[in-house]
Amino acid sequence: LSLIYSCRRVTSHNPLALHHLYDIAEGEEIVVSLRGHDLDGDKTTATVTKLPTKGTLYQLSYVFDKHGYDPKTGTPITTVPTLVTGQNSRLVYHRPDFDYTS
């Protein structure tokens, strides 16, 4: 998963993308917060620049993003670059079931 963080720069500090590592079981999904940090306190945004080789990324559904109720998954992210629209740069990753036939 490749991301770009950006912000409107008032001073010379660039935003920092924080490293995240998640462990998720086969066939499960997780809400991922792609937070960055800017030394100047400017608001940051996250952009997906590379899709995972396995699994699917989704924007958060409106209901989950605003109120915290299921369903979590909204529109699938199928093209890059794609701006992450969930509050706090959150999105959903769904890990596929393991394919025992190959």
Image: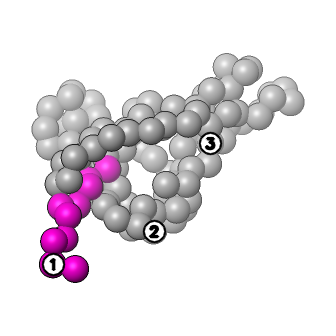
First along the sequence among labels 2 and 3: 3
Q: Amino acid at mark 2?
A: Thr
Few, some or many residues within 10 Å of mark 3 (<14, 14–19, 20+): many
Tell me if residue 32 comes above or below residue 81 in the rendering: above
Reply yes or no: does residue 101 show up in magenta.
yes
Residue 60 at least partly seen: no
Q: Main secondary structure of the magenta part?
A: loop
Tell me if residue 30 comes above or below residue 1 in the rendering: above
* Residues at discs 2 and 3 in contact (Cβ within 8 Å): no
Residue on which the image places disc 2 = 79
Residue on which the image places disc 1 = 101
The quadrant in which residue 17 appears is: top right
Q: Secondary structure at mark 2?
A: loop
Residue range corresponding to the magenta coloring: 93-102
* Residue 27: percent from left, percent from top: 17, 54
Picture colour scheme: one colour
Residue on which the image places disc 3 = 5
Closer to the camera in the image, 20 or 6: 20
Tell me if residue 2 comes above or below residue 18 in the rendering: below
